[in-house]
Image: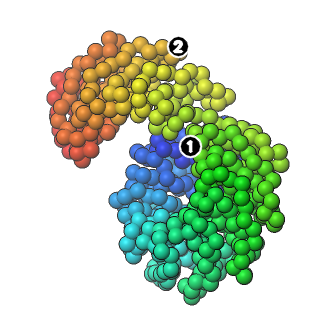
Amino acid sequence: MYSPDGETFAAGLENGTIAVYSTSTWKSLWTLEGHSDAVLSIAYSPDSNQIASGGEDGTARLWNNRTGDCDHVLNGHYDMVGRVAYAPQGNQVASASDDMTIKLWDVHTGECQYMWIGHTAPVAGVIYSPNGNQIASNSEDCTIRLWDIETERCSHILRGHEDWVLCTAYSPQGDQLASGSSDSTVRMWDVATGECRHIFDDHTSVIRSIMYSPNGNQLASSSDDKSIRLWDVDTGKCLHTLRGHNDYVRSVVYSPQGHLIVSASDDNTVRLWDAETGVGRQTMTGHSQYVSSVVFSPKGDQVASSSDDGTVRLWDVSAGTSRHISSVHNDSIREVKYSSRSGHILTCSYDNTVRIWDVATGVCRQILRGHNSYVFGVVYSPHEDLIASCSADSTVRLWNAESGACTHTMPGHSDGVNAVAFSPQGHQLASASDDCTVRLWEVKSGECIYILIGHTNSVRGVMYSPSGNQVVSVGADSTLRIWDVETGACNNTL
């Protein structure tokens, strides 16, 4: 997603981080770390100074886009937060959750102002009207609800779809709302009355994305039927059917000027279309897996696309060529860690590898291979001469940070290892596992010192106290345990 001022680009990742890039150099500005699971949604504030994110961990977060700091953690939802949106005035953020609620948050204090209850199934999306007086929410309960900000009440329930409502869009004037559903139809609603004005039923499969043209005269829809359709808003007639993709079309977006349309598909391509004629202009190939999202730059001269192949590509609209490739891994990225000294970044992935990147050039310096399954965690030692990694293959590995050579493979856990942490002095390592144990290891020899038994479910996280005398572990059994490093005894269970 581009910031409104066009100066930065942000991407939410499955490892719970958000990567923010400068669009002038396409170098990384920072990685926003805080979510404990996949980032499902991000949004920029209208002034570009803040980023909101919603995560699978059930939290929303507000980040300072100038410093990379987390301003607020928005706790309150008890299930994943699938969508976040800023009010046009920038003073408020709305979040939609699988807990069937919508919450409104003050961006300055992080306090929850309202909670709206009414949907009877997970809320898939939430958007503000252009004037900020209304919010539309769409749900798996097959309805759209319109909420009045001033009265704090639901003004209309829009019924008619026969399956999940996956996407909504306000017209630029704010007097209409369009909705797309798994029932293969697009509907257009009068916001003032809640009446359905048009039903577009030419698609033959799920509607994935809809968007009004900047002037509000057209509506574009993309579908699993491999097509894009352009509709006349006044008459409800289909103006053009755009064919060319060979698989589901996940996203369709108008350029800021309205003369072009870009689409992203499961056929691994990005396509440019003429919005007036419906004729294809460019087919942009390069991604090796499905393209999940696509967006125009604020000036409309570039397109950014993200893919399940682990890359973000920047395309030149006039030439249709890829100008920049942010290639990361061959599968989902689990974790990203910055070096405080060397100007390097560590990433670990479901492709079973750890990679070391040069921040300045974006070049991969080393690929650390050895794990036989997903790599869940990676961390530098305090002196940054060693790297520790943990994996679903039940092992912990130590690597030489300069050469990339594996110095120790530490077996012992009987299930996947979720997290690792070095002691502040760097001579010891702790690991947390799905086998319900924590293990302490001597870094020099790679030998296990203690097996800490007490959790009754998976241990998800582990860290040392600043003094290094204690280890804290967090379990899926809803407990936090504090262990004595010298004796291996559990001092306290919270």
Residue furthest out toward the bottom: 193
30 lies above or below 345: below
Q: Residue at x 64, y 30 (%)?
A: 362
Q: Which residue is drawn at 41% across and 13% down?
A: 407
The secondary structure type at the circle numbered 2 is: loop
Horizontal relation, residue 342 to residue 102: left or right: right
In three-dimensional space, the C-alpha distance between marks 2 and 1, rounded to whole angstroms, equals: 30 Å
In the rendered image, is residue 214 in sight? no
Residue furthest out toward the top: 445
- Per the rendering, the mark at residue 308 is 1
**Dot 2: few (<14), some (14–19), or many (≥20) neighbours within 10 Å?**
few
Q: Residue at x 25, y 33 (%)?
A: 435
- Per the rendering, the mark at residue 168 is none
Q: Nearer the viewer, mark 2 or mark 1?
A: 1
Q: In which quarter of the image is the C terminus?
A: top left
7 lies above or below 286: below
184 lies above or below 52: below
In the rendered image, is residue 322 in sight? yes
Give the mark nearer the N terminus: 2 vs 1: 1
Horizontal relation, residue 461 to residue 201: left or right: left
Q: Nearer the viewer, residue 30 or 95?
A: 95
- Per the rendering, the mark at residue 403 is 2
Q: Residue at x 32, y 11 (%)?
A: 445
Q: Nearer the viewer, residue 179 or 16?
A: 179
Horizontal relation, residue 452 to residue 5: left or right: left
